[in-house]
Image: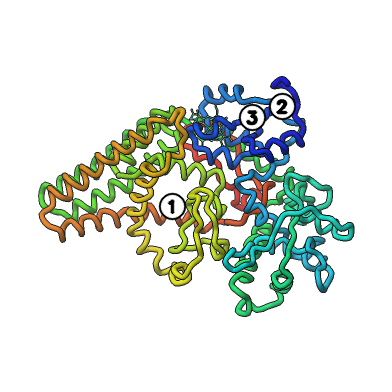
Amino acid sequence: MGRDHVLSRQDIEAMVADGHAVVIFEDYVLRLNKWLHVHPGGDLAIRHMIGRDATSEITLYHAAHTLKTMKAFRIGRKPTGPWSNMTPPIRATTSQEASSTPSTPSECSDSALPEKGISSNQGVNSSIAAAELRPDHGTALLSEKSATADNDSHLGACLQTSSQPKPNSCSRRPSPSGALLQRQQTPPVLEIDDEKALEAARLLPRRGRKQMSPEEYTEWAMQQHRDLDMGEYPSLDHSVQLAITERYLKLHEDIDAQGLYECHYINYAKEAVRYLTLFAVSMFAIYKGWYLTSALFLGLFWHQIMFTAHDAGHRAITQIFEVDTLIGMFIADFCCGLSIGWWKSSHNVHHLITNQPEHDPDIQNVPLFATCPSFFKSLRSTYYDFTFVWDRAADMLVPWQKYTYYPIMGIARFNLYLLSWIHVLFKSSQLGGSKAWWIRPTEIVFMACYWFLFGYALLWRALPDWRTRVLYVLVSHVVTMPLHVQITLSHWGMSTSDLGEDELLCPAPAPSPQREPPIRPRPPSWR
Ligand code: HEM
C-alpha cells in the first residue's frame, strides 16, 4: 500500500485502538510509534495528538528543515474533508469527564429525562460522568458502553464519543450569530450503575449546597464551570472553531507582515546590560560586606534573566534548537540552578493541553492549592504519572489557600530546584534522545556548577556566618516571588473545563521568534 493511499476513518481508528501513535499532519497520516521515545519534544507532546489533526501544533513547533523530514513517517492520506478529532488514548480515561452537556434545559438535560428512575443507565446528564469517584469510596461507577435501547437512543446520542460523529445533537450553544448550532461530535456513552449517585446527580440543582456530599458538590461545581464556559465562549461547532483558527491565522499574517516577529538582537543586548548591572551590583555589595543588599540584587538578577530563558526555551531567539537550548541552559541551569529541560518538557505540555487538570502540570499543586473543583476528587496526572490524592493534608491546606498563596510563592523557587534535580537525575529525560541527547548531561554539569558557585563559593566562602547565610538565601529567593505570582496568577484564574475534542486548542502560525506557542483561545473577544 503506497503512502498516497487514502486511509478510511475506520482504518485510522483501528490503528489508534491497536496502540499505534497515529497523527494527522496536513493531508497525511503519520505513524510515530518508533519516534515517540526519541522525539526531542518528548513523547507526551505526541501522545496528546494521537488521533487528532496536529497540523497546527506540528507547524508551530518545528523548524522548516524538520518539517521536511516528516515525510518519512507518512503511511497514507487522510480521508478528504476536515478531520474530526478523536480523543487521544492518553486522555481516554478523562474523556468521559469531557462529555458534559449543558445542564441548562435542552434535549440532553435533566428536563428531557423521564421524571423518575431515569431508567436509563444511559440517559443521565453526563455531568455525572465526571463523578468518577475515588476508588476507595467504592464508587467508581462509570463505564463506556454503546447505547442499546431504542427509546434511549436520543439520550445515548448525547453521550457518544467525539470520534463517532452522530447526526443527533447535544450541543445547544448559540453560534455568534445567535443561531442554534449542532455539535458535530458528541461525547461518550456511559453506563451508570449506581442508582444513588444517579439520583443524587439528577437532584443536584434542586438541593442546597450544604446538603451535598463531597462527591456531589465536586460534580456540581465542575458542572457549574462547564456551564459557564458553554455560555461564555464561542460555540464548539466546527465552523465556529474553524473561523477562530482563520482569524488567528490572519492575525499571525498581519503580525508577520508588519515585521513584528523579527527578532532584534539589539534588544537582547540591552537586556543583557540590565542583567549584568544587577549581577555586578550584587557582587560589589558582597565585596563591601553589604550582604542583604547583595542578596536583593542577586534575586533581582535571577528574576529578570528568566524572561530570556523563557524565550530560549520556546526556541524564540535564534530558532535553532541547539543554540536556543544552550542559551536557555546557560541562563536557567548555570546562572539560576534550574533545569531548562524540565521547563521545556513541562511547558510544552502546558501549551498543548492548557489548563486541563489531569494533563497540565502547571496547575497541579494539591495539597497546597486547588485551582478548580476537579482536584476535589483524586486526580491522576498524566505528566507526573502520579495521583494527586485529595487527602487530609489537602482538606486542611486548600481552604486556606487565599492566605497561604503569597507566602508559598515566596519560597516557590526551592520547589523548582527540587523539580529540576528530579528531572535530570531520576526521569529518563522526557525530551527524547535523538536531537536532545546532550541536554541532560550538560544540564547536570551546569547545575553542579551553579551549586559550586552559589552554594560553595558564595554562601560558604564569602559569607561570614550561618545567620547571614540563611538570611541571604531567604532574601535572594523571596525577591523572585513576583515572577512566580505573575506566572501562576495568569494561568490559575483561567478556565479549566474540558469541553471535549471539538474545542480549539491551537491556532496555527508558523515558527517565528518572540512568539508564544498555542494557548487556549478562550478570551471572549473572539465572539
Ligand atoms: C504530534 C506531533 C508532534 C508534536 C505535538 C510535536 C511537538 C514538539 C515540541 C513541543 C517540540 C519542542 C520544541 C522546542 O523545544 O523548541 C518538538 C521538537 C522537535 N520535534 Fe516534534 N512534535 C511532533 C511530531 C514530530 C515529528 C513527526 C517529528 C519528526 C521529524 C518531530 C521532530 C522534532 C524535532 C527534530 C524537534 C527538535 C526541534 C526542531 O528541530 O524543530 N516532531 N516537537
Tag 2 residue: 77
Q: Residue at x 46, y 67 (%)?
A: 394
Residue occupying image coordinates x 61% and y 48%: 91
Q: Which residue is mark 3?
A: 30
The answer to whether 319 is drawn above or below residue 375 in the figure is above
Ranked by sequence position, the earlier of labels 3 and 2 is: 3
Q: What residue type is disc 1 on?
A: Ile
Q: Indicate which disc residue 350 carries.
A: none
In this view, 267 is above or below 461: above
Q: Position of residue 378 (x, y in %)?
A: 54, 62
Q: Is residue 360 left or right of residue 84?
A: left
Q: Is residue 88 above or below residue 58?
A: below
For the N terminus, give its image quadrant: top right
The type of residue carrying mark 2 is Arg
Question: Is any part of residue 421 visible from this angle?
Answer: yes
Q: Identify the residue at image location x=63%, y=45%.
A: 89
**Residue flagged by tag 3: what amino acid is it?**
Leu
Regarding mark 3 in the picture, which secondary structure is present there?
strand
Mark with earlier residue (2, 1): 2
Residue at label 1? 487
Numbered disc 1: secondary structure: helix
Marks 2, 1: nearer the viewer: 2
Q: Is residue 264 visible?
A: no
Q: Are marks 2 and 1 in contact (CB under 8 Å)?
A: no
Q: CA distance from mark 2 to mark 1?
A: 41 Å
